[in-house]
Structures are given as C-alpha cells and as structure tokens.
Image (spheres, helix red, strand yellow):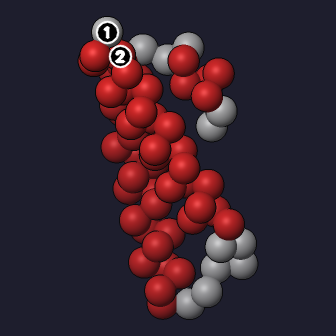
Amino acid sequence: MKQSEIKELSVADIQEKLVDIKKNYTDLKMAHAISPLENPIQLRDLRRTVARLATELTKREVQ
C-alpha cells in the first residue's frame, strides 16, 4: 500500500487496515517459521505497510 493511498483513507479506515495487516503479518510470520515462504519479501512489505499506517495515524492524532 502506497503512502498516497493511505493519505486518502479516513482514521477509522486506517485503524481497520492496521489491525487487518498486523494479523496477516503475524500469520505469514508463523507460516514462514514452520516452512519457508515462496516469497519472503512479503514479510518486509507487510512490516513496512504497518509502519506507514501507524505513522499516518500518529501524524493525524498530533494535528
């Protein structure tokens, strides 16, 4: 998810996506621990998306 897409979302949408992506990240991380993923770059992308969402949420709370 790109930063430009995140900026268009409402606060409620960002919180909802954050919970959903964190769950997805945890599931993939556990699956990777059991047997290697075909594309382990997915983990990095999800982790960065979580950071982008959390950063945007914090930025909006400060404003």
Where is residue 20 drawn, in percent x and y? 40, 45
Q: Quadrant of the N terminus?
A: top right
Residue 59 located left or right of residue 47: left
Residue annotated with mark 1: 63
Residue displayed at 50% across by 55% down? 47
Residue displayed at 49% across by 79% down? 31
Label 2 environment density (alpha carbons within 10 Å; few <14, some 14–19, many ≥20): few
CA gap, disc 2 to disc 1?
5 Å
Residue lying furthest bottom in this view?
Answer: 35
Where is residue 55 drawn, in percent x and y? 42, 33
- Contact, CB < 8 Å: mark 2 with mark 1? yes
Amino acid type indicated by mark 1: Gln
Residue lying furthest left in this view?
Answer: 61
Residue displayed at 59% across by 61% down? 44
Q: Against 32, is 21 above or below? A: above
Depth check: give the residue in front, 9 or 56.
56
Name the disc covering residue 25, or none: none
Depth check: give the residue in front, 45 or 35.
45
- Residue 14 visible: no
Q: Against 33, is 18 above or below? A: above
Residue 9 located left or right of residue 62: right
- Residue 55 visible: yes
Label 1 environment density (alpha carbons within 10 Å; few <14, some 14–19, many ≥20): few
All told, the count of numbered labels is 2
Q: Against 48, is 42 above or below? A: below
Residue displayed at 65% across by 73% down? 40
Q: Quadrant of the C terminus?
A: top left
* Secondary element at tag 1: loop
Where is residue 42 drawn, in percent x and y? 64, 62
Name the disc covering residue 60, or none: 2
